[in-house]
Image (tube, rainbow, N blue to C red):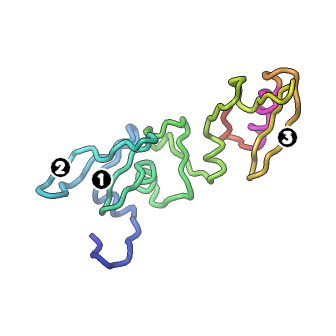
Amino acid sequence: MPLIGSPPQILTAERVRELFNYDPDTGLFTRRIAIGYRGRFRKGDVPGTDNKNGYIRIIVDYKKYYAHRLAWLHVFGYLPEEIDHIDRNRSNNRISNLRPATHAQNLSNALRLRTKSGLKGAYRFQNRWKSSITSTGKQIHLGLFDTAEEAHAAYVAAAKKYHGEFARY
């Protein structure tokens, strides 16, 4: 445990493995040792709380960490830039549901529907339907279409091209 006034400690895989068991099939952690005032947190307890955004957070040495990041560190021993939940379920921390990603890839996997059509990538523009996609921070115009379905089809093709396995439509 760091002393007051000491520089912040970098969390290591060894420290995570010392404190927790991790089941890659369920994505759950359990405590390996009792900690806290009078053993408040017992050996075998499942640590963590669900934050308001659906992520599980676990406190390690007085600092909060996302469970998916601890799972990756526990299994692989390092932390990538970001970790993507393949099924977009933020509380599903099974190792098979996690993959390393860049920030742009992680955003590509998000499913956001803010269109009147209900189809991703199809926006009403005057009397037609417009389609566009963002890739590497740049918006790419895909065209104007007579129907929302045509605009959505153009978006789907572009998503496969620009976002690959991270594409969501």
Give the mark, 3 or 2, whose residue is nearer the N terminus.
2
Q: Nearer the viewer, residue 66 or 23?
A: 66
Tell me where residue 49 sits by quadrant.
Answer: top left
Mark 2, residues whose alpha carbon is within 10 Å: few (<14), some, or many (≥20)? some
Residue drawn at point x = 30 percent, y = 62 percent = 62
Residue drawn at point x = 50 percent, y = 40 percent = 97
In the rendered structure, which amino acid carries the disc numbered 3?
His
- The residue stretch that appears in magenta: 151-162
Q: Which mark is residue 42?
A: 2
Tell me where residue 7 sits by quadrant.
Answer: bottom left
75 versus 124 height, above or below: below
Q: Is residue 26 left or right of residue 164?
A: left
In the rendered structure, which amino acid carries the disc numbered 2?
Arg
Question: Which residue matches tag 3?
Answer: 141
Mark 1, residues whose alpha carbon is within 10 Å: few (<14), some, or many (≥20)? many
Magenta residues: mostly which secondary structure? helix
